[in-house]
Image (cartoon, rainbow, N blue to C red):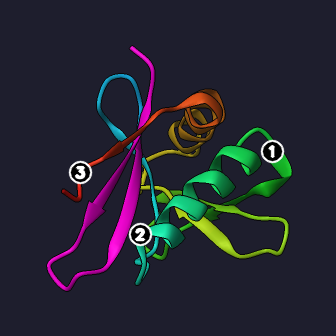
């Protein structure tokens, strides 16, 4: 089963998306967007930038966990990972985004 993007609407009316792996695990989350079109543009940016390893900012959190941000060419963050317990798990998450994002369908859950 391949990955997919899910567009959702928050209680405050803003929009956001998640990229989920084929097993249903959330591997990337967006910021909040005022407009649904902006969230859709964010998905396109993730699809475009996901294959490029230089777009990933690998980080260690203050509590010793690991995470990453995916950045666009303009250095804006277009997606943020969950926290991982090891650097290897984080790197596996990056590989999952690279594999799933470029061809992932978009499921609109805002209706």
Q: Circle 1 is placed at which residue position? A: 53
User: What's the distance in space between the residues labelled 2 and 3, CA to CA?
Assistant: 11 Å
Q: Quadrant of the C terminus?
A: bottom left
Q: Circle 2 is placed at which residue position? A: 36
**Is 110 covered by the magenta stretch?**
no
**Is 8 covered by the magenta stretch?**
yes
First of labels 2, 1 by sequence position: 2
Q: Say above or below: 69 vs 33.
A: above
Q: Circle 3 is placed at which residue position? A: 109
> Which class describes the residues within 10 Å of circle 3: few (<14), some (14-19), or many (20+)?
few
Q: Is residue 9 left or right of residue 106?
A: left
Q: Give the extent of the magenta segment.
A: 1-19
User: What's the distance in space between the residues labelled 2 and 1, CA to CA?
Assistant: 28 Å
Q: Position of residue 2 (x, y in %)?
A: 45, 20
Circle 2 SS class: helix
Q: Say above or below: 103 vs 37.
A: above
Quadrant assignment, res 96: top right
């Amino acid at each position: 089963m391949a990955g997919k993007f899910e567009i959702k609407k928050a209680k405050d009316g803003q929009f956001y998306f998640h990229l989920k792996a084929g097993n249903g695990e959330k591997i990337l989350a967006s910021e909040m967007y005022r407009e649904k079109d902006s969230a859709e543009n964010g998905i396109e940016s993730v699809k475009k930038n996901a294959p490029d390893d230089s777009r990933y900012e690998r980080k260690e959190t203050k509590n010793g966990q690991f995470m990453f941000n995916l950045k666009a060419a303009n250095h804006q963050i277009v997606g943020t990972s969950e926290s991982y317990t090891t650097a290897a798990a984080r790197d596996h998450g990056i590989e999952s985004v690279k594999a799933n994002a470029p061809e992932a369908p978009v499921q609109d859950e805002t209706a």
